[in-house]
Image (cartoon, grey):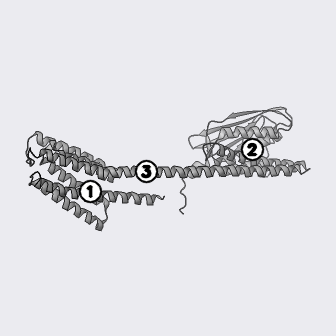
Amino acid sequence: MKKSQIDSDRLGNKTKLLLKFNYTSSGLSIVFGLFCIFIIDVKGTIPFVFFLYASLNLLNSVAFKYHGSLTAMAIYTSILSWASTMVISLCSGGINSSFIFILAIIVLAGYVSTQLLGKIYMYIVITSIVIIYLIDWLDLNIFPDEVSSGAQDLFSLASILFSVYLLGWIFGKNLLETHHNLYRSKSEIEKRIDEQEMLLREVHHRVKNNLQTVSSLLNLQAKNSDNQQIKELIKGSQNRVLSMAMIHEMLYLRQNLSKIEFKIYVQELTEYLIKSLNDQQHDIDLVLDIPDVQLGIDTAIPLGLLINETVTNSLKYGFVESRKGCITISLKRNEANDTYTLLVSDDGAGFPEHTDYRNTKSLGLKLIHNLARQLHGSVRRIKAAKGTCYSITFKDIEKKLKHIPQPRT
């Protein structure tokens, strides 16, 4: 559901609630006024205020149909309710009047409208109660008590019923309906999320299977060729495909469907490469210095391909003469500019310093630099006493794109 539709529904619910409160409180005020005149023989200010409140509140509801301002109607209703409750409370016992509890309903009505109005009404009501108490304490007698001692119990009973009916029938019922609607919406949203996660998990599973099928086809193609160079080219393509398949497999098997645990992925990928490319059974050690970090799929795929190329180059060309070697991969996060630095190095033979990826025929070297640009970063070769070392600086692409506004559909 779109945000505009949600806001419209919320505004409509508030409008219905306030109109229901106005009509119900006006009707009860008329009944209460008649009760005061004919049952408990109170014919002064109290019934007059009840009838005046009912009339002005009904006019307020009718006026809303013309001006359409919910805030104006809510403020007018609150002021009218507050003034009427103050006068009736002062005329029916002051701080001891049972009708004073209507002030609490005014606060609740304010919070139903907006949080700001609720806070304002709360402070006004607290101040009003203190004023009523001070008037009684100072014995100012601004408003004479119109309810006789014999009618006090009936007036209290009517006041309590008036309060409970408004609180229960209007606000209590609305809060219960709102709670049920929220619970139903929450359940529907959770159900949709579960369905989407299931579908996304299935997508990752199928992508992984398709990539593995492509890898198997490449493997069959390599077996059908007698050309060793072609076999090596196909093997390189096969490893690139499998490096992507591993990511989709990790996303399928784990809870997080958008990020992968990078350290585990690098370990599985490099161990596979060492096992599959180490034809001469060299003693290759693997050293990983990678923190527990999760990267988005848009970052992990090109980064996995980049690691595949650098490790493949090390295994194919770095340890031709040596029977023992070490490949080191480390990752550090630069908090200052929210970037990562990946170091991939070996202690093998290395390659000539004058080699440039722009004029070399090596597809692997070209891919390394192209993938670095895809990660919005850069790659450079660090001079080492022995072997080869690459330093790749990049950003988590998913984090960068998260704040880019999406086009409206």
**Mark number displayed over residue 308:** 2
Q: CA distance from mark 2 to mark 1?
A: 67 Å
Q: Nearer the viewer, residue 409 or 92?
A: 92
Q: Tag 3: residue type?
A: Leu
Name the quadrant containing residue 393.
Answer: top right
Q: CA distance from mark 1 to mark 3?
A: 27 Å
Q: Residue at x 46, y 51 (%)?
A: 184
Identify the element where label 1 is drawn.
helix
Q: Does any portion of residue 117 appear in the rendered image?
A: no
- Name of the residue lying farthest toward the bottom: 66
Mark closest to the chain's N terminus, 3 or 2: 3
Say if 198 sits above or below 320 in the image.
below
Q: Tag 1: residue type?
A: Ile
- Locate residue 144, reporting x and y percent: 7, 48
Residue hosting label 3: 182
Q: Dot 1, crowdedness within 10 Å: few (<14), some or many (≥20)?
A: some
Q: Residue at x 75, y 43 (%)?
A: 310
Q: Residue at x 68, y 51 (%)?
A: 373
Mark closest to the chain's N terminus, 2 or 1: 1
Q: Tag 2: residue type?
A: Asn
Number of callouts in the render?
3
Name the quadrant containing residue 77.
Answer: bottom left
Q: Dot 2, crowdedness within 10 Å: few (<14), some or many (≥20)?
A: many
Mark closest to the chain's N terminus, 1 or 3: 1
Q: Are marks 1 and 3 in contact (CB under 8 Å)?
A: no
Residue hosting label 1: 75
Q: CA distance from mark 3 to mark 2?
A: 49 Å
